[in-house]
Image (cartoon, coloured by chain):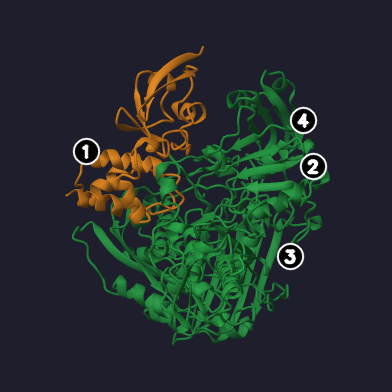
Chain colours: A green, B orange
Amino acid sequence: MEELKFVGKSLPRIDSKEKLTGAAQYVDDLEFGPNLLYAEIVESTEAFARVTKVDTSEAEKITGVVKVITGKDFPYKFGLYMKDRFILAQDVVRFVGEQVAAVIARDPKIARRAAKLVKVEYEPFTPVFDQMEAIKKDPILIHPDLGEYPHVPWFYPKAGTNIAHWKKVRVGDMEKGFEEADVIVEDTYFVPRYAHCCMETHNAVGLLDYSGRLTVWSSSQSPHTQRNLFAEALSPLGFTHKDVRVITPYIGGGFGGKAGVTMEILAAAFATKVKGNPVKVRWTRAQEFYNTYMRQAVVSKLKLGAKKDGTIVAFEGTNYWDAGPYVEYGANVVNASGISAAGPYRIPNVKIDSLCIYTNLPAAGPYRGFGYSEMMFGVESQMERMAKKLGMNSVEFRKKNAFKGGDILVYGAPINDNGYNECIDKVAQAIDFGKKEVSDDPNKVIGKGIAAAWKGPAMPPNASSAAFIKFSEDGSINILVSGIDMGQGYLTVMAQIAAEILTVPLDKIRTENPDTDRNPYEWQTVASHVTWSCGNAVKRAAMNAREQIFDTVHAAYLFDKSTLYLEDECVKCTLKPDFALPLKDFVIDGIMVKDGTFRGGPIMGKGMFMPEFSSTKGDPETGIGGKPNVHYTVGAGGVVIEIDKETGKVKVLKTAQAYDIGKAINPSLVEGQVYGGFMQGLATALFEDMRFGEDGSILNPNFTDYKIPTALDIPDEMIPIIVEVPQNDGPYGARGVGEHVMIPVMPSIANAVEDALGIRIKSMPITAEKIALAIKAGLKEVD
Amino acid sequence: MKKTITLTINGELRSVDVEPNDILIYVLRDKLGVKSPKIGCERGDCGTCTILLNGEPVRSCLILAIEMDGQEITTVEGLSEDGLTPLQEKFVEHNSFQCGFCAPGMTLTATKFLEKNPHPTREEVQEAIAGNLCRCTGYKQIIEAILDVSNKLN
C-alpha cells in the first residue's frame, strides 16, 4: 500500500493558534456597529395553557424599545422532519420557557426591563410531564391537530394520541423465539433528560438589509439546513433561498444541541421587523437549558431470551421516549435509535417499538449519541445480566452474538465489515476484565464493567456534502466546505485529506468556516458523518484539482497525463526524472509556452458526495426494507471503578475505549474525542441530574446545581484504542467516531457497580446517594 | 451616572465611560473590543471569562467595571508580544483544545499557575484548572500540555 504522508498522522490542529490567541471569532465576538439591536424573550410561565392575552402596551412606552413582537407577527410553522412548532407561540403554550413574545431595544438592559412589562394572561390546562401518563387511555392531547402536520415519509404519527412517531421493528417469530430460550431476562430501565452544556450558549444575529437580503450569523451545526428552513418558514414574506444567507464562524461546542434550527429562527424572523438593523439574540445559561432541545428521557422495557450455550434467540423491547412538546427534530432520534435498539447482535427474532411521546417538559432532541447513548444503557445492562445468568463471561457472550461483516441487520441489509471483537478483546485486556481487584482501603470496593457501542449516522438517505478547493499564487490552498468544526477537528481532517492528494503541507492550507453564499452545500454536521461524507467530497475536490493541474501541464509540455504525479508540491513525470514543476509556478497564472501564450489558469477543484445506496423505504409495520443506515461504527468501553461503601461515591480509576473507525485520519484528534466523550458520558452516569419542579420548570438550570465535570473528575488512566477495519466507501477507509465514545459509558459504569457491590441499578444517574441508600437498605436491585 | 475610568489593558493605558452597574466582562467585550474573555454562565461558575487582574486570574463576570480604575488587566491578546508562549506552543502540540471557547480563560489560569508553581504534580494541575470548565476535551490533553511545559522548564 502507498505510504501516506498526511493521513494517519497526529498533526497539530490548523485552528489552534487562532483559538489560543483570542483571534478565533465566535458569533458574539463579531462587530455589528452602533445599529445593533438586542432582543429579550418573554417566556411562558405555564407548562400548558391557552394564551388569552398578550399586552405589550407598557413595554412599548419604554424609551429605547424599538419593537415588541408577539406570535401574531409570525404565524408560520417550521421543522426539520415534522412541522409541529411555530416561531413564537400562537394560541397555546406547551412548556415552561416557550417563547411568547419579544422586546427589541437599543440596549440589552432596556430590552430586559421592558420584557418584564409584557403582560401575558393564560388559561391553564392540565399538563402532562410523564410520557407513560401521556399515552394512557383518553389523554389530554398536546397536539390535537397532529394528524395534519407535514412530516417526512418515514414518520408514523398517531393522530388523536400524544404519539408523534411510532417506529416498529419486526423480525422472525417472537413466540417461537422465547420458547427456544432457556433463560429469559426482563427488566425496565430509565434514563432521564440531560443538557448539552456547550460552553458557548446559542446566539444568533439577523439582519435584513435595505435591499431585502436576510443574513443570519449563527452558532450552528447546520448553516445550510438553517438557510433552507428560514427560507421555507419565511416564504410567506416573499423570501427565496437566494435572499437568505447564513454565516457560521467558530462555534463553542455543539454535541447535537446546535443541530437543525432552534432559537436562530428568532433572529431571522425579528430581523424582518427592524429592517436595516442587525438584531442579536443570545441565550443566557438558563435559557440554554430550556430552549435548545435537551436530551430526551426514555423508559426501556426489555425482554431478552438466550439458549444455555449463550446464543441469543429473541429480543423484545419498547422504548417510551419523553420528547417534550415539539419533536420536529427529536422524532428522528426515536426513529434512528429504534432501528438499532437491539444492540450490535445477531438475533433471529426481534420486536422493537419506539414511541416518540409528546409531554409538557421542554422540547428535547438530538444529543451526542442520538438515542443510542440513551437506549444502550438498557441493552448493555441486559446483556450483562443475561451473561451472569448463563454463567458466561460477558465478553465471550457478546462476542458470540456480535454482528460480523455481511450479517443481515433487522431491516434486511448487510452490516459493513467491522472489528467489534477486536475492540472488546482489547478493552477487556486493558482493564484486566474478569480479574477481581481489592482496594487497599477496607471501606472501598473495586468493580469492573464493560459495554458495547454501535451507531450508524442518522440522516436522510441523500444527505450530501460538497467541497471547493482553490489555489493562491504561492501554491497555498483554501478549502471551502460547510461542515462545522465544533471541536472535533473537522477543519484539520479535511486539510489532511486534501494535503494527501495535493502534497501541500498543512501550514499552507486553510479550511474555511461556512458562509452559505460562498461555501458549497453540506447537509449538517451531525451523525458523526462529516469525516466520512465531507471527507469524500474533499478528496474528490482534491482529485479534481489534481486533474486540472495535469491537464495544464499536458497542454503546456505535451507529457502524457498518465506519466504525471504530484510530489512535494511539484508536478513530476515518471519518464523525466529531472522534471519538477512547482505548483506555485502555474496554479494561478498558467504556464507560458514557446510563443509567449499561456496554458491553464486558476485551479479550482470541486467535489461532492451523496450516498447513492441508502433508502428509508421500509415497511411501516415491520421496518423491513430499504437501507436506512449507510454503515455502523462499533466499539466497546470498559471501566475500573472504586466505590466508597459509606458515602456511595464512585471514582472511575481507569477506562479503556476501543472503536473501529476504519482509519484514523488524525489519531490525536480521535483520542481527544475518546477523552471528551468519555467524560461527558461519565457525568451522565454519575452526577448530572436535572430536576423539574411540579410546574414543569427546571430547578437547576445552571452550573452551580447541574454539575458538569471538572479536571478533578477525570480517571487516573484513560486508554484510547483505535481499531481500523477500513470502510470501503470512506476517505482512506474512515468512519465517524464523535458520538460513539459516549454510548458505552453509562452501561459500563452500571455493570461495574454491580460487579463491585452486587447491586443492579436500572436508572440513571447512579448518584452517590442512590448507592449509599441501596447499601443501607440491603437492596440488590434499584429501579 | 456615567464615570470615566482609566485602566491598563494588555500594556496600554485606556479610558472608558461606565455606568456604576456595568459588569467588567461586557465593558471589556462591548466597549473596549477585547473579545477573548467569553460569556459562558454570567455567574462565576464556568471560568470562560477569566482575565488576569493585576496578575491574578479572576472572573470578569463577577466584577464591576467601575472598580477597575487604575488597575491592570491582561488577556490572551496581551500574553505574548510575538508568537506564542511556551505554554501555548505545548497546547498546540498536544491538540489540547477542541471548540476553543474555554481556551483563553484556561490559558490565563494555567499561565499564572505555572508562574507560581513551575514544576507541579498532575494533581496540582488538576486542582489549579478545576475552576475552568471545558465540555469538549475531558481535560487530559490540557493537563498533559501543562505538565509538558513544566518539564521543559526543568
> What residue is drawn where x is 40% and y is 38%?
B47
- The residue that disc 1 covers is B116
Residue A623's x, y, as percent?
68, 75
Q: Residue A407 in the image: x percent, y percent?
A: 55, 85
Closest to the observer: A162 or A41?
Answer: A41
User: In the image, is residue A452 above or below residue A399?
Assistant: above
Q: Quadrant of the N terminus of chain A?
A: bottom left
* Residue A156, label in figure: 3
Q: Amino acid at mark 4?
A: Lys
Element under disc 1: helix
Which residue does the numbered mark 2 point to in the structure image? A75
Label 4 resides on the chain identified as A
Residue B151 visible, this angle: yes
Residue A772 seen in the current view: no
Q: Which residue is mark 4?
A: A53
Q: CA distance from mark 2 to mark 1?
A: 59 Å
Q: Quick one: label 3 or label 2, which is nearer the N terminus?
A: 2
Q: In x, y percent, where is residue A446?
A: 28, 63
